[in-house]
């Protein structure tokens, strides 16, 4: 028989084993750690955990894990053949969690061959681009409606700004003082011609000439610009052809390329100087708004 006081170490070991036996019995009766602590008067958490080590906690003390449901749903989706991306999107959880939950399950059989997958991706991309083009066209249509009716003054100011941005301008060292306008945009050309009509410039004073690369379809371009300007092809001056540099890769080619139209106003020195003055007035008023 062992004497308890013969060794402090032995006594403590015996006390621990006695407490452990009681703690295990209480644990198996369904008590929580808090209840065991209060019953045995053991307030040291480390000692309390050692006393019940290896004994599972009662079911009623276990807190539900919020991710348990997600895990089961993720596994169900994987069994249905869903990919990691699809499970992430469906459950709103991270890829690392999905991988941890379903990595023991077999990979789903691909629904499409690589070629079919590429075709689906191209179709999806085209639908996305088409939707984007539709949104942009709706924005353009809405913006066009915002303009409303164009008054003479609005057209006048627009024409002055348009000429000063795109037209030929005299330099202090080279005063040409003649209205010469070059552009490849049909809308710009038509707006410019409407502006000249507003200013009372007679059509007889207008000269038209096509400026285009020599490799293009020159007769087709002349017919195109004659239609835009509302004149006969015979009314156009001889075209100016730009030589093609073989080292330059041009993108303005094909049936949609028509070059530029040059609009020259005869006897326009006085009008040119007025345009220069009008533009100066716009600049002055704009600067005044800036303070």
Image (cartoon, rainbow, N blue to C red):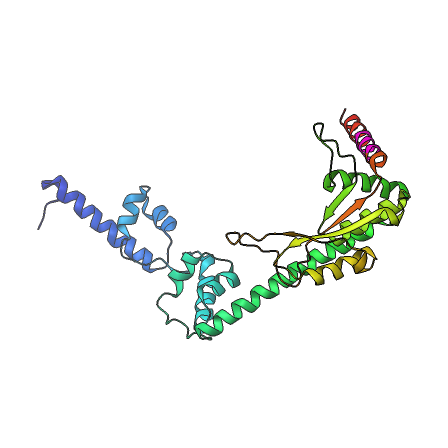
Q: Residue at x 31, y 41 (%)?
A: 44
Q: How far from the left and from the top, in percent, is residue 192?
A: 81, 47
> Which quadrant of the figure has residue 124?
bottom right
- Tell me, yes or no, whether the highlighted magenta stretch contains residue 278: yes
The image shows a total of numbered marks equal to 0
274 w.r.t. 76: above or below: above
* Residue 176 visible in the picture: yes
* Residue 150 visible in the picture: no
Q: Is 76 on the left-hand or right-hand side of 189?
A: left
Q: Which residues are magenta?
A: 273-281
Q: Is 202 on the left-hand or right-hand side of 122?
A: right
| Residue farthest toward the top in the current orientation of the protein | 291
Q: Quadrant of the C terminus?
A: top right
Nearer to me, 124 or 155:
155
34 w.r.t. 175: above or below: below
- Tell me, yes or no, whether the highlighted magenta stretch contains residue 189: no
- Majority secondary structure of the magenta segment? helix
| Residue farthest toward the front in the current orientation of the protein | 238
Nearer to me, 239 or 110:
239
Q: How far from the left and from the top, in percent, is residue 131?
A: 65, 62
115 w.r.t. 285: above or below: below
Nearer to me, 71 or 26:
71
Q: How far from the left and from the top, in percent, is residue 244?
A: 57, 53
Q: How far from the left and from the top, in percent, is residue 157?
A: 83, 39
Q: Residue at x 36, y 65 (%)?
A: 103
Q: Residue at x 14, y 39 (%)?
A: 8
Q: Is 1 on the left-hand or right-hand side of 76?
A: left
């Amino acid at each position: 028989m062992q004497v308890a006081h013969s060794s402090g170490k032995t006594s403590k070991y015996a006390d621990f084993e006695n407490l452990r036996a009681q703690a295990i019995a209480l644990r198996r009766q369904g008590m929580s750690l808090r209840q065991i602590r209060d019953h045995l008067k053991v307030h040291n958490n480390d000692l309390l955990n050692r006393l019940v080590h290896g004994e599972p906690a009662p079911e009623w003390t276990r807190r539900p894990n919020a991710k348990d449901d997600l895990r089961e749903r993720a596994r169900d989706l994987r069994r249905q053949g869903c990919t990691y991306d699809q499970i992430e999107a469906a459950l709103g959880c991270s890829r690392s969690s999905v991988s941890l939950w379903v990595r023991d399950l077999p990979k789903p059989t691909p629904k499409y061959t690589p070629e079919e997958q590429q075709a689906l991706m191209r179709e999806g991309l085209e639908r996305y681009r088409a939707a984007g083009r539709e949104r942009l066209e709706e924005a353009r249509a809405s913006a066009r409606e915002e303009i409303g009716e164009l008054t003479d003054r609005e057209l006048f100011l627009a024409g002055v700004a348009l000429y000063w941005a795109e037209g030929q301008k005299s330099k202090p060292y080279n005063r040409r003082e003649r209205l010469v306008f070059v552009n490849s945009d049909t809308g710009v050309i038509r707006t410019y011609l409407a502006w000249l009509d507003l200013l009372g410039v007679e059509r007889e004073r207008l000269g038209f000439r096509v400026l285009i690369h020599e490799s293009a379809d020159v007769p087709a371009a002349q017919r195109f610009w004659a239609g835009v300007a509302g004149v006969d092809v015979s009314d156009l001056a001889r075209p100016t052809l730009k030589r093609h540099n073989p080292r330059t890769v041009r993108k303005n080619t094909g049936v949609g390329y028509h070059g530029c139209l040059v609009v020259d106003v005869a006897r326009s020195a006085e009008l040119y100087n007025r345009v220069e003055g009008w533009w100066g007035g716009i600049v002055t008023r704009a600067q005044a708004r800036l303070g």
